[in-house]
Image (cartoon, rainbow, N blue to C red):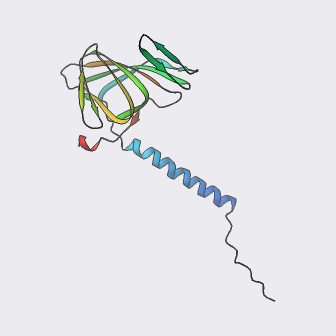
Amino acid sequence: MMRNTKPQEPRMTLRSARVVGVIAVAIAATALIAPIALGSAGSGATTTVLGHRATLWNAIQVNEDRIKFQTKDATDVQTQTITFIPGGFSGWHHHPGVILVVVESGTVTVHDENCQTLTFGPHESFIEGGPGAMMVSNQGSVDAVVYATQVAPAGSAFRLEDDPPPCAG
């Protein structure tokens, strides 16, 4: 007597499942790392971290003197001095969170993802933040020194490399 049975499909062994898992992780890691490898490294810029990265463990909400500052979770704070030699540039990048930048000396030009530029001189400041690619350059004839203070989600990178936007080519 014949039974009407469906042919059995091959079963995935534990070892096969692990191999597939490792391959999936490798593909995902490659997808995450590739944009960094294709990023635009800077040249002629020297960075010095002032102190250590510090964490604000609690959410902060301050609204004083028409200035509002708010975090919703733990955040890290880090300050750096960046010196750009004439012709130096940061490379295309973006930052998690917000960067408050003060120009101490010289001038720097900020290039955004739409290739719009703004130039800042001594004792002027600007803010960096958001996912859009940007670059800072020294188009002047003397060194430019800036102080950059980042407030970002705890544990996040200080900087993420980006490819130059099409308008920068």
**Which of these two is toward me, 33 or 43?**
33
Q: How many labels does the image show?
A: 0
Rendered residue at 55%/55% (across/down)? 23
Position above or below: 30 against 124: below
Left or right of 96 in this view: 43: left
Q: Quadrant of the N terminus?
A: bottom right
Rendering quarter of residue 37: top left
| Farthest-out residue, left | 141
**Which of these two is toward me, 33 or 126?**
126
Q: Can residue 42 be seen in this view?
A: no
**Which of these two is toward me, 70 or 50?**
70
Q: Position of residue 77 (x, y in %)?
A: 48, 21
Rendering quarter of residue 116: top left
| Farthest-out residue, bottom | 1
Rendered residue at 40%/20% (across/down)? 80
Q: Position of residue 56 (x, y in %)?
A: 55, 19
Rendered residue at 55%/50% (across/down)? 25
Position above or below: 132 against 70: below
Left or right of 50 in this view: 144: left
Left or right of 71 in this view: 79: left
Rendered residue at 74%/80% (across/down)? 5
Q: Quadrant of the C terminus?
A: top left
**Which of these two is toward me, 124 or 50?**
124
Rendering quarter of residue 16: bottom right
Q: Position of residue 70 (x, y in %)?
A: 49, 21
